[in-house]
Image (cartoon, coloured by chain):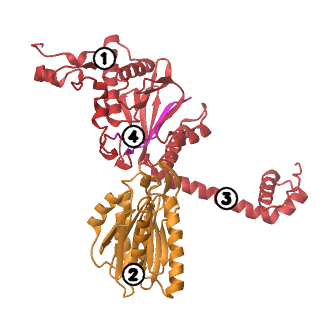
Chain colours: A orange, B red
């Protein structure tokens, strides 16, 4: 098992009409043994910017703390909230700084630009950015997620449809992955605010 | 070789043979008793070497993760299994039948390589039937498990992966044997095999007793597999339970683990609610009960009162005898 599959877990984000949603599973394991079913791997950076991290959980936590620190300093120096595109570049450079001894984490960034349009991007552990206008995936069942998202995605969904589509795509993929699952959390980000919903998933 | 119909299928074992299939007649081919070996210097190493250079994801991956258990008790034998076939981290199937019905009075479980288990246990069924025809009596469980153990021992080192439990009820009572592809054969009253076996053992050992009733035994077996499917990533799906009785085996149930999950959750909630209610009642009446030592249902209320007082950090008063 590779180091990126040691703890398990996956994150997926999808765009709708002037809204984005980001979802993750809740499992934390040590190879095949499940340790926790309430582990959080999607973090709020700003009110309209969320960062999901998969991979080695130790690096997920470290990067979360590191980006919180960097965003606090950014807010102090610039006196404003960071834009999603700028944050994505920040994440990319931070990861590439460790090119020859990387963080074993693969981020997914989901947010709303200042003008309300959705922004989605995913990166590998070295910081290679892939921006998409429909959906981005990361984690141990990434291939399955690509399949389910491709099947269920439609353009310009409203927040409720987006929640349903994203939830079903993730649940279908989780059932084919041993080391992800045990619960699902979905955050739906709109101009008005963020709604968090939990889905009942298979607990095996 | 033979000009008439071949009776190769009656021979007693699948022998390791270097038979060149081109020389078999069409009738013989279908009933050949030889498992073909690669025509190389060291056939035992062929499969391993073939994949030696490949990346991990291209190698031959066996469907391995599983939890199976079986135990003997006063009412016979209970066997319970999960139904997930995992290939590395991928869920290959959620509906695998891991209890193999060898014949109406013998059961075998599957753990390890699915093909290895199902093939060799079906072969065991064939040989048990031949024994019955030749000796006019059913084969004993000990003999059946020994046939399997000796068969797979002949392939030791060649990469078979099989951890199975053979169980049945013969003239000397119910018997359970564990047999694996290393050649181990163990007689016992309680076994659990697979990646989730450690979790199942915890629950099984805690609740097992020889004198259990049949319903309790079934409940225990189901719960043990449930807890293993919950914690072990490589186990899951549907929980199948069988009961071996004197007349033969019978399938008891086939429940999705999520159904058991809801039951366990509801039970825990009921226990928590009951404990809270008692704690609430005891907390309000704790001082009165402790001081007076009332006779009306004193022991239970006092014990809980003391316990809740202790948990609140107060020093519990000495329990007055009733």
Residue at left offset 40%, top offset 26% = B105
**Is residue A32 or residue B283 the one in the foreground?**
A32
Magenta stretch? B61-86
**Can the viewer see residue B219?**
no
**Is residue B1 or residue B12 the one in the foreground?**
B1
Cβ atoms at labels 4 and 2 below 8 Å apart:
no
Q: Which quarter of the rendering shows the N terminus of chain B?
A: top left
Question: How far is mark 3 from mark 2, CA to CA?
Answer: 48 Å
Point out residue A74 in the picture as x, y percentages from the top left corner: 50, 81
Residue B154: image quadrant is: top left
Foreground mark, 3 or 4, reads: 4
Q: Is residue A67 toward the left or the right of residue B159 in the image? A: right
Q: Which residue is mark 4?
A: B64
**Is residue B85 or residue B280 the one in the foreground?**
B85
Q: Which subunit holds the residue at mark 3?
A: B
Residue B274's mark?
3
**Is residue B187 or residue B317 the one in the foreground?**
B187
Q: Residues within 10 Å of mark 4 (few under 14, many from 20)?
A: many
Residue A112's mark?
2
């Amino acid at each position: 098992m590779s180091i990126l599959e040691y703890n398990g877990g996956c994150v997926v984000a999808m765009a709708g009409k002037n809204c984005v949603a980001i979802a993750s599973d809740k499992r934390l394991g040590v190879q095949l043994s499940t340790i926790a079913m309430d582990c959080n791997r999607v973090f709020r950076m700003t009110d309209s910017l969320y960062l999901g991290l998969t991979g080695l959980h130790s690096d997920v936590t470290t990067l979360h703390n590191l980006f919180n620190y960097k965003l606090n300093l950014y807010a102090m120096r610039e006196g404003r909230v960071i834009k999603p595109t700028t944050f994505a570049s920040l994440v990319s450079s931070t990861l590439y700084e460790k090119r020859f001894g990387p963080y074993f984490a693969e981020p997914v960034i989901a947010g709303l630009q200042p003008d309300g349009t959705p922004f989605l991007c995913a990166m590998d552990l070295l910081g290679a950015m892939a921006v998409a206008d429909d959906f981005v995936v990361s984690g141990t069942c990434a291939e399955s997620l690509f399949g389910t998202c491709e099947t269920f995605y439609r353009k310009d969904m409203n927040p409720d449809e987006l929640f349903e589509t994203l939830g079903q795509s993730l649940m279908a993929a989780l059932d084919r992955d041993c080391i992800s699952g045990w619960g699902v959390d979905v955050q739906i980000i709109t101009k008005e605010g963020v709604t968090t919903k939990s889905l009942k998933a298979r607990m095996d | 070789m033979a000009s008439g119909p071949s009776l190769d299928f009656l021979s007693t074992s699948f022998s390791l043979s270097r038979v060149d299939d081109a020389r078999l007649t069409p009738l013989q081919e279908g009933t050949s008793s030889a498992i073909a070996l690669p025509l190389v210097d060291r056939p035992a190493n062929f499969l391993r070497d073939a994949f030696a250079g490949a990346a991990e994801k291209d190698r031959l991956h066996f469907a391995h993760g599983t939890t199976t258990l079986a135990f003997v008790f006063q009412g016979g034998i209970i066997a319970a299994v999960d139904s997930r076939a995992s290939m590395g981290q991928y869920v290959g199937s959620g509906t695998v039948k891991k209890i193999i019905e060898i014949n109406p009075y013998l059961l075998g479980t599957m753990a390890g390589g699915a093909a290895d288990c199902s093939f060799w246990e079906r072969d065991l069924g064939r040989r048990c039937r031949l024994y019955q025809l030749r000796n006019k009596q059913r084969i004993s469980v000990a003999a059946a498990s020994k046939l399997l153990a000796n068969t797979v021992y002949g392939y030791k080192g060649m990469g078979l992966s099989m951890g199975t439990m053979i169980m049945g009820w013969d003239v000397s009572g119910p018997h359970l044997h564990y047999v694996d592809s290393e050649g181990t054969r163990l007689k016992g009253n309680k076994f659990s095999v697979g990646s989730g076996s450690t979790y199942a053992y915890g629950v099984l050992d805690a609740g097992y007793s020889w004198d259990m009733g049949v319903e309790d035994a079934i409940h225990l077996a189901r719960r043990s597999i449930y807890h293993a499917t919950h914690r072990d990533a490589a186990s899951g799906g549907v929980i199948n339970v069988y009961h071996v009785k004197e007349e033969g085996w019978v399938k008891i149930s086939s429940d999705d683990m999520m159904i058991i999950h809801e039951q366990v959750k509801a039970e825990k909630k009921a226990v928590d609610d009951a404990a809270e209610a008692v704690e609430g009642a005891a907390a309000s009446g704790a001082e009165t009960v402790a001081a007076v030592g009332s006779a009306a249902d004193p022991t239970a209320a006092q014990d809980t009162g003391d316990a809740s007082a202790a948990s609140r950090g107060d020093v519990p008063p000495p329990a007055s005898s009733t």
